[in-house]
Amino acid sequence: MRIGIEAQRIFRKNKHGMDYVVLQEIIELQKMDLHNEYFVFVAPGPDRCIEDSHNVHIIEVGGNFYPTWEQISLPKAVRETNVDLLHCTSNTAPIHCKVPLILTLHDIIFLEPRDKRNRSLYQNMGWFYRRMVVPRILKKCKRIITVSKFEKNNIIQKLGLPDKQIAMIYNGYNDWFRPMDDEDCVFAKYMEERGYLFFLGNTDPKKNTERTLVAYSKYLERSTVKRKLLMADLDRQYLDDIISRNHIENIRQMIEMPGYIVNSDLPYVYSGAFAFLYTSLRESFGIPLLEAMACGTPVVTSNTSSMPEIAGEDAILVNPESADEICEQLLRLENDKDFYEQQVKIGLQRSTLFSWRNTAEQLLELYETVYRETYR
């Protein structure tokens, strides 16, 4: 097979969730499959995180404006490389594509009402683009991959697609996520000492940042330890607005905001944390859950969408709309040593059920199925 994989943004410096997913899939396929030929379509960028091998070819396609790159430049590159099928990995795909198409649809949040509080131009443009493109390509897809049973059921129910068209393939996590005990731990770049709380919040309303910070304020009022909170990649003005709106001035001096944390530092940051807060309103999968668990860090997560499915029934599952529940579980972890140690063990065991190798094996099997159905 000559397999095309769209990986437009993997060479950018500050990668995010979908970038890491396709990058790890390609790395695993490159290691395990020496028979088929791969053409990976990327936009130029500063972080050349994967190189050519004898059967994996990195094809740089010019243009940084995503809609024109995907709708014009990518189809042209697909024609020139004469691939047998194209896997688009980030929720959208070319409307006009003459080869069999496989789409990874991580979620269908674009169909849900847009939160009017979201002022991010980038996020809003992406929402409108997906809303315009995705309905036009779904029937053209030989298979649609999604990343959890929750999201598969959601897609079937809301889009009316046949079960046979949808493939559920779990994500994995990198094997360098494990407990780190080095004295000169990298976490010191971000915090003075171990034992902080860690939260990957941002301005997207689904991340539930505001309610989580209210819960943290309640925790500070009741805790005798009063652990600091490390927050990655959050705008200072956004934080100030939350503090003013909710009258939670007590959190201001307790929060560290270092900006973007590179992925290679994250195992140390998780390991240095007392607990990890993953209290989103909605997630299609939740790779940070597994990363924290694999580092031996207890996780407080939500009882909604895919999070119970990924974290498991024995994890700490809270109502993300209840600041009091989030606070109570942080205090329980702090005051009940046996409960804390139990959650460490639960997380370490749960994380072993997922790997990028498993993901890549299922992905290759899907490529082979689509190829047989199309060409034989």
Image (tube, helix red, strand yellow):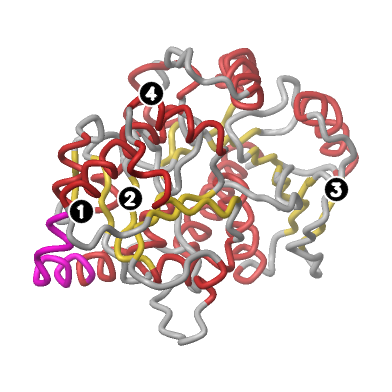
Q: Which residue is mark 3?
A: 44
Quarter-wise, where is residue 49 in the image? bottom right
The residue at 62%/44% (across/down) is 371
Query: Disc 1 vs disc 3: which is toward the camera?
Result: 1
In terms of depth relative to the viewer, which is nearer, 315 or 357?
315
Cα–Cα gap, marks 2 and 3: 34 Å
Using the rendered image of the protein, determine whether residue 122 is visible from the camera's viewpoint. yes
Query: Disc 2 vs disc 3: which is toward the camera?
Result: 2
Identify the secondary structure beneath mark 2.
strand
In this picture, which residue range is highlighted in magenta? Answer: 330-344
Q: Are marks 1 and 3 in contact (CB under 8 Å)?
A: no
Cα–Cα gap, marks 1 and 3: 43 Å
Cα–Cα gap, marks 2 and 1: 9 Å
Relative to 19, does residue 243 appear above or below in the rendering?
above
* Residue 247 place in picture, x, y as percent: 33, 29
Callout 1: few (<14), some (14-19), or many (20+) C-alpha neighbours within 10 Å? many
Left or right position of 282 against 137? left
Q: Which residue is mark 2?
A: 277
Q: Are marks 4 and 1 in contact (CB under 8 Å)?
A: no
Q: Are marks 2 and 3 in contact (CB under 8 Å)?
A: no
Magenta residue check for 337: yes
